[in-house]
Image (cartoon, rainbow, N blue to C red):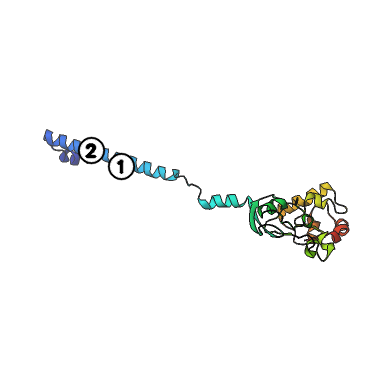
Amino acid sequence: MVEWFVKAVPENATSRRTLLISAGAGVAAVAVIGALWSNATSGSGDVAIQPGADTQINSQSSNTLFVQVVGAVAKPGVYEIPVDSRVMDAVALAGGLSRNADPASLNLARIVQDGEQIIVGAAGDARSHSVSPSLSDKVNINTASVADFDTLPRIGVTLAERIVAYRDAHGPFAGIESLLEVPGIGDLTLAGMRDKITL
């Protein structure tokens, strides 16, 4: 190996200098290429992914819901409103109550649910008081507020709050019997209010 190296290096000083300069330039070139390659590969993991429009839309849509307002209002239709809005907010978006509206036909203070249809009855209209008064007097367990539940037999404020909290956490009740899944509600409690509640 040593003999090969000695033979490979020219004896002439000028040729030897040229060879050394060429070798140095080659080493420098390899070092520069290596540095560039290292920076390129290490920087590839630093690319920031900007949130797209879909992410923003989903974030916004989770804070709103849609309701349909029909009946004695100025502009019946489907409206998008913030979560936890009340019936009076939806009615306001629909242009407010018309002149012949019956304010007593609905609970304006009730919190609305996504996909709900709000019907504003007209004064003197049989539909505003319903053909079956017993149904209009019943508490809808999927839309009722804490105050609404508090009007039921055997249900106080604490249990009413527990029902609403359970519904918010698990979604609308599938049936009247689903109330038994709420801690604190047993068969006797359900039997006492069964004829006063509906879906």
| 58 to the left or right of 103 | left
Residue 56 locus on image (x, y percent): 55, 49
| 8 to the left or right of 150 | left
Residue holding disc 2: 25
**Residue at image coords 78%, 63%:** 125
52 above or below 32? below
**The N terminus: image quadrant:** top left
Residue 142 locus on image (x, y percent): 75, 57
Residue extending furthest front? 99
| 2 to the left or right of 79 | left
Q: Secondary structure at mark 1?
A: helix
Residue 183 locus on image (x, y percent): 80, 52
Residue 189 locus on image (x, y percent): 87, 55
**Residue at image coords 68%, 52%:** 92
Amino acid bearing label 2: Ala
Q: Secondary structure at mark 2?
A: helix
45 above or below 192? above
| 10 to the left or right of 109 | left
Marks 1 and 2, the one that precedes in the sequence:
2
Residue holding disc 1: 33
113 above or below 35? below
Q: Can you tell which quarter of the image residue 136 is in?
A: bottom right
Depth order, front residue of 111/93? 93
**Residue at image coords 74%, 54%:** 167
Report crowding for label 2: few under 14, some 14 to 19, many 20 or more residues within 10 A (C-alpha).
few
Amino acid bearing label 1: Ile
Q: Can you tell which quarter of the image residue 180 is in?
A: bottom right
